[in-house]
Amino acid sequence: MTAADERLLAALRAEHGAIYAYGSLGGHLDPVTVAVAAKAETAHRALRDALVLRFTAAGTTAPPAEPAYTLPSPVTDQAGALRLAVAIEERTAEIWRAALADTTGADRRLTLDGLSACAVNAARARRAAGIKPVTVAFPGRP
């Protein structure tokens, strides 16, 4: 398995975790912010699906989602749900960014799409949470 494969497997695992987390926080959001979360979850599902297709086409079995994931903090209200959404996007962006060094061609395009989606989702979540600045200079940088 190549370094690019390992990095993209890490991204797939992160996408599985992001989808799980969005399912956990949605019940704590009002109608406006739930729409923001739904867009983000849809983006993560699309990235997950693209990764699964990529691995399947290469003859590699993509790892399935875990039955459950540990969230970094409990979610009890909208503010906590939005903080979790920002954390999900920042953590997932770090994994996508790490893959940039090892990917080329179509894998690089997928990696850039993943990093870009996380940056946009994080900005939307920060705006909904009232966190400033809304954007960061280098998404995915710890």
Image: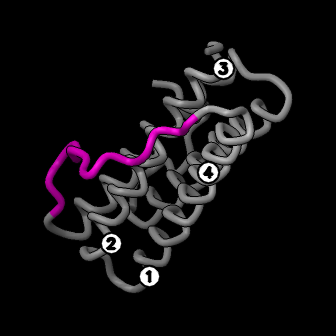
For label 1, the SS is helix
Q: Which residue is mark 3?
A: 4
Q: Are marks 3 and 1 in contact (CB under 8 Å)?
A: no
Residue 33 image position (x, y, % from top left): 41, 75
Q: Which residue is mark 1?
A: 32
Q: Are marks 1 and 4 in contact (CB under 8 Å)?
A: no
Q: Which residue is at 63% across, 43% downward?
A: 51
Residue sitting at the far right:
105
Q: Which amino acid lies under the numbered mark 2 shown in the image of this protein?
A: Gly
Q: Which circle's residue, 3 or 4, is located before the other in the chain?
A: 3
For label 4, the SS is helix
Q: Which residue is at 31% across, 54% downward?
A: 83
Q: Which circle's residue, 1 or 4, is located before the other in the chain?
A: 1
Q: Nearer the viewer, mark 3 or mark 2?
A: 3
For label 3, the SS is helix
Q: Which amino acid lies under the numbered mark 1 shown in the image of this protein?
A: Val
- In this rendering, position of residue 76 left or right of residue 63: left
Q: Answer whether residue 64 is magenta in the image.
A: yes
Residue 70 image position (x, y, % from top left): 20, 44
Q: Which residue is at 36% across, 45% downward?
A: 87
Residue 82 image position (x, y, % from top left): 33, 61
Magenta residues: mostly which secondary structure? Answer: loop
Q: Which circle's residue, 3 or 2, is located before the other in the chain?
A: 3
Q: Which residues are magenta?
A: 61-75
Q: CA distance from mark 4 to mark 2?
A: 19 Å
Q: Nearer the viewer, mark 4 or mark 2?
A: 4
- In this rendering, position of residue 100 left or right of residue 88: right
Work out whether residue 60 or residue 12 is closer to the camera in this orientation and state it: 60
Mark 1 crowd level (few <14, some 14–19, many ≥20, 10 Å Cα):
few
- Residue 80 falls in which quadrant of the image? bottom left
Q: Are marks 3 and 4 in contact (CB under 8 Å)?
A: no
